[in-house]
Image (cartoon, rainbow, N blue to C red):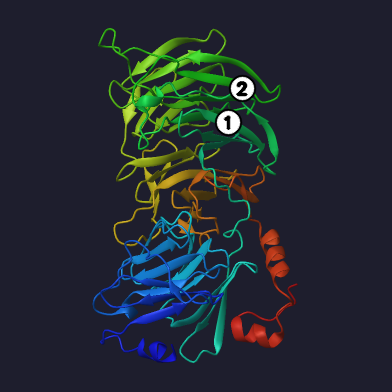
Amino acid sequence: MQRLYRQRAMVGYPFPDAQVSADDQLMALCLPGARVQLWDIPRRRALPTVPNLTAAAGNCTREDIQFTPDSRYLVLRGPAGIRRWDIASGRELPRIQHQGLRNLDFSADGTFMAATDSDEVLLWRTGTPAVPVFRYPLSDEVVSELHLDTAEQQIRYFAGRSQTIVRSLSLDGIIDSRWHKEPATAAAFSPDGSALAIAYQDTATGQAQIRLRHGRSGSHMTELPPAPCPTPPEDMKEFAPCPVHMAFRADGRVLAYGISDPTTSLPGEKIYLWNIRTRQLTGSLPVTRNHPKSYGMPGNAVDGIAFHPDGTSLMTSRIPQAERIEFWDLRRRTMTRELPGAGGRNLAVKPGGRVMATDLGQFIDLRSGRITQRALTPGITTALTFSPDGSYLAAGDESGQVTIWDGDARRPLGVLPATPARGTDSRPVSELAFSPDGRTLAAAGKDGTLRLWDTQAGRPLGTPLPTAGDTLLSITFSPDGKTLYAAGKHTQLQKYALSPERTAAQVCHRLAAAPSQAEWRTHIPDIPYRHTC
């Protein structure tokens, strides 16, 4: 074994390789060009071969094999990424597709994997390995002895070739014990952030279950009556699930929710109205429609909803063909008006109540019905919001870029660049939210990134906030602007203290002791020493 280990550096020769599990019960033997063999060490016998696991013909050391710390999984590191197998069943698990990984280290239970490439330290949640949940730039730094400590929520490694410097990276807020296996489909905060609606969907029937939680604590409030998907089960497609719609009224007292077929308005398509204060269903809107130009043919399904500023009606959007905005009277439960030629999945009403913007770049005068068109982003707009005073409009697109406009969208005020992505990967903006004073913009991504921007300077405020790495479905600021709340696909509620006082208190809580004068001179020599914690 020692000879094999020494030979690993001689990558030009076709050497075999062997690895032993942490409990000394299993050995994986790699022979160039052959299937990897598994051996039961105490019993001295070969185990069933792991399917589809054949070593490269040239050299086993180019495709490292190892066991996870719990000895349950076998791991193969190849040029294109990481492959894993459940040893008991032989089943291959979802792959981590990322080129040039090295310095692998797994958490004790195999839930997380840390690694480096030439540019970054990265962390994946192995159950959902599509994108890393943590990235840290290296700046040409040499890394060795990478260690993942989930108990302390840190990644540690030697920095530099001398191995005299140890760096510790905090994973606070990333390794989140509140991670739920059941994914949420949609989420929405009430305007003041006091309530949070989260939708979960049955994959077999498409039925949506809406759960209301307190927006500050995440504690359970109530569960709403389910909304059935109008699509027959035999016609449901995994790649096109029934979309869920949710919107709070401006006063936060009513939640509208419903579910539609992905494309067609079918019988049973409804929008339900729930009174937050009395915790009662007050009625529903029968929004099933026929095609306006083809008699007897079904129309397009509802694609987006928003309350009218006066609170007495609900606006529904139907796109992409024969697009239109419909106005539904909440008391009479009937459609009172429709506006052809406008629609969008994301609908944003400008404070003041006169204008509504759509993600298709349409601006609708809600009194006259006049529609004007403007291109809000260079590509497909995925998120849209006005600042509380209506002086700004922010539009995010599928590349992760955010464009800030004046409130009338006549003049672009700045472009917030996307987070750099590897290769052809994109990081679409999933949600946007302004602080109450409009000076800070929070931008959430489908890859779990969460960034803060100074809207006046057009600059990022610090590095991205730590998240659990799941898609963020809704974000909002507290009324005083000192806390940011985020609801994710797997983490129901995350909180971020934004005031300098709270941030300083958190830093002091993490430190075992205040920095000494010598440590201060080493790390921040340009600032005079002062007692901090």
Residue denoted by label 1? 210
Quadrant for the C terminus in the image: bottom right
Q: Cβ–Cβ below 8 Å for labels 2 and 1?
A: yes
How far is disc 2 from disc 1 in space, using C-alphas?
A: 11 Å
Q: Nearer the viewer, residue 498 or 489?
A: 489
Q: Nearer the viewer, residue 382 or 412?
A: 382
- Above or below, 35 against 380 in this view is below
- Above or below, 477 against 277 in this view is below
Residue 127 placement (x, y as % from top left): 48, 55
Other residues around mark 1 within 10 Å, as few (<14) / some (14–19) / many (≥20):
many
Identify the image quadrant of residue 132. bottom left
Label located before the other in sequence (2 or 1) = 1
Residue denoted by label 2? 274
**Residue at image location 46% in from the left, 89% down from the top:** 161
**Residue at image location 56% in from the left, 74% down from the top:** 23
Q: Amino acid at mark 1?
A: Ile
Residue 158 placement (x, y as % from top left): 52, 83
Task: Judge from the rendering whether residue 21 lies leftward or rightward of residue 178; answer left or right.
Answer: left
Q: Which mark is residue 104?
A: none
Task: Judge from the rendering whether residue 513 lies leftward or rightward of residue 180; answer left or right.
Answer: right
Q: How many marks?
A: 2
- Disc number lying in front (2 or 1): 1
Residue 34 placement (x, y as % from top left): 28, 73
Is residue 243 visible in the rendered structure shown here? yes
Identify the image quadrant of residue 13. bottom left
- Above or below, 421 against 286 in this view is below
Quadrant for the N terminus in the image: bottom left
Q: Amino acid at mark 2?
A: Trp
Other residues around mark 2 within 10 Å, as few (<14) / some (14–19) / many (≥20):
many
Label 2: state its secondary structure. Answer: strand
Label 1: state its secondary structure. Answer: strand
